[in-house]
Amino acid sequence: MLQPWDQYGLDVLEGRIKSGRYTRLAVERHFRDIRHQADRQLIWRPEMACHVLEFFPRYCRHFDGQWNGKPVELAPWQAFWLAVEFGWYREDGRRRFRTWYEEVARKNGKSTKLAGLGIYLFALDKEAGAQVYTAATKLDQAKITHSAAEMMVAKSPALRQLVQNNKNILRIPGTANRYVPLGADANTLDGLNVHGAIMDELHAHPTRALWDVIDTGRGSRRNSIMHAITTAGFNQEGSICLEQRGYLIQILEGQLQDDSYGGVIYTLDEGDDWFDQSNWVKANPNLAVSVNLEELDSQAQKARHEPAALNNFLTKRLNIWTQVERSWLSLDAWNNNAQPVDAEALKGRTCFGGLDLANKIDIAAWVLLFPPVEPGDKWAILPRFFVPADNIALRDRQDRVSYTSWARQGYITATAGVQINQDAIRTQILQDAADYDIQSIGFDEWNAGKLASELIEDGLELVALSQNFQNLSEPSKELEARLLAGDFAHGGNPVLRWMAGNVVVISDSNGNYRPSKKKSREKIDGIVGLIMALNRALYHKPATPYVSAYENEVCL
C-alpha cells in the first residue's frame, strides 16, 4: 500500500521531478527492496517510518528566519528519505541501516533536519541510555552545529518539558540519555557507546580518525546509526568523505551489496550545463522553498566571470566536487590582456618557446612568447594545442568544455589516433622555427624525450626544466606581475583562458610558488608552457637588457 511519502519517489521515477542519476538510483533501490524484501531477509515497516516523521511537526520548531517558532513540516523529499532510513528493519528486529550518507547543496534545510534527527535519536527512539553525538573535527565547530538542536529544544514547549540543557549537553532527567557535541580534539574519545552520531559537512574532515572512533564505539548498540550529511568539497587524497561517497555509489550502481549502508546524492549529472536553471533542482531539492532562485541565479552570474566564485558555486550550490578551492590568476586581469595577436605580423620576430607534453592521451601545449621590440609594445603570446582526435569527444565529457568546438574553430589541432602525434607537433614547431626567430625552448621532460632529441638534431636550443620552484617560481611571479600591469597580448584564445582560470599554485616557506597540476581544477598545460617560455626569456641572456616587472631591475 502506498504511503504519503511515496509520492515523492514516484514523481522522481516518472520524471515529474527532475533529478540526477544517483538520486534516481537511490529511489529505485528502495522500491526494488520492497518488492524483494522477503528474499533479502528484510522487513519494510511503514509504522516505524511514521513514528519519526510525526515527531518533527509535533515536537520540533523552527528557530530562525521567517519560519521562527513554527512547527517543522518536512519537505516531501526529506520525508521520503527519513522514511527510508528509519522504516527498514532486519528479520532479527534490528534496524537495517547503520550508516547513512547524504549529499546535498547548501541552503536545503540540513541544519533543521539534523537538529530534529539528533533529538529524535536521543529522546524518542526508545533506546535506553541513548548516547548521541554531534561530531566535528573541532569541538568548537561541533558546538556551532549542535546549537541548532539546543535552539530547537528552547523553541518547543513539549521538548522544554522533557529535555534539560546543561552547558551544551542535552539530557533527559532520570535517564542516561544525552546528546553531546564531540570534537576530534577532545581530551579523550575512549569509551564511547554510540547510539547515534550526526556528522555534518563530512567533506571538511581532513582524516578518517573521528569517523573510525565513532564507528568502533557503537558495536554494543542494536539500532545504532551514523548519519553523515555534507555538501561537495575539494578533492583530497585519502578523504573519508570521498571514500564514503564512492562506497554508496558502488551500492547504487549494483557493484556491491551492503544492506546496512544507505543514502542519497543530489548533484548534477556529467555533461549538464552548470548555468541552465532547469538543472539546479538536481542538487537543490528544496529549490523555491529554502533555496532562493534569484539568489542562486545571482551567484551563477558572478561565477561566470570569477574562477574563485565558480568553484564555490559548483561545490556549495550545485554540489559538484571540484579540485581546487581558489584559482591563482584573476580572469579580470587576464581579460584585460586580450589584445589581438597577428601571427603574420610577428614573422621574423625574436621569441621563446614553452613545450608541455604532459600526457600522451590528453592535451599538449606549445606556446610562443614574443618580447616587445619598441617601448610600449606588448608581450605577444601565440599558443598552440594538440589533442588526439579519437579522444576528443571523451575530453568534452570529462573536462566539461568543448574541445570539439575549439578544434573546429582552429584553436586546437586534432591529431590522428588515440595518442598525441608528436610528429605533428614537431612539424608545427619546425614551421614556427622557419617563421620566427626562436631563441630557446623550455620543456618538461615528461613524455618529451624523443621529440626533444629530434628538435635538438633539427638545430633548435631546448632546455629541460624540471617542474620545481627553482625553475618556475620567478617566471610565475613575472607572469602575474606583467598580467596585472597589462603588458601581454594573448588575443583572447579561449583554450588558454580556460586554463588560466584553472591554475592553483603551491608555495614554500621562502615565498616561492609555482603552478600545481595535481591541485589545479582542470588542465593548465598552456599556462605551464607560457611560464617555461618566460623562464627562457628571463635566463637566456638576451642581447638587449630585459626589464623584470617583478623585480623592477635590469637583468642581462
Image (tube, grey):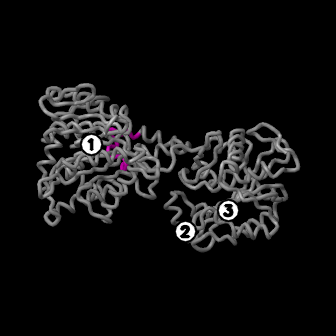
Q: Amino acid at mark 3?
A: Glu
Q: Quadrant of residue 133?
A: top left
Tell me the number on the disc at residue 445: 3
Relative side of 372 to 424, left or right: right
Highlighted magenta segment, given as a residue range = 281-293
Of marks 3 and 2, the one in the foreground? 3
Residue 309, position as x, y percentages in the image: 51, 41
Q: Quadrant of residue 253?
A: bottom left
**Residue 420 visible in the snapshot:** yes
Residue at left 14%, top 28%? 173
Question: Is the stretch drawn in magenta largely helix, strand or loop?
Answer: loop
Seen as rendered, the residue at the extreme right is: 543
Q: Which residue is mark 2?
A: 391
Is residue 379 in the magenta section? no
Relative side of 142 to 500, left or right: left
Of marks 2 and 1, the one in the foreground? 1
Viewer-closest of 106 and 133: 133
Label 3: few (<14), some (14–19) or many (≥20) C-alpha neighbours in 10 Å: some
User: Which quadrant of the figure contains the C terminus?
Assistant: top right
The reply to whether the C-beta atoms of the residues labelled 1 and 3 are less than 8 Å apart is no
Residue at left 27%, top 63%? 257
Label 2's element? Answer: helix
Instruction: Tell me which label, 1 or 3, sits earlier in the chain.
Output: 1
Q: Which residue is mark 1?
A: 197
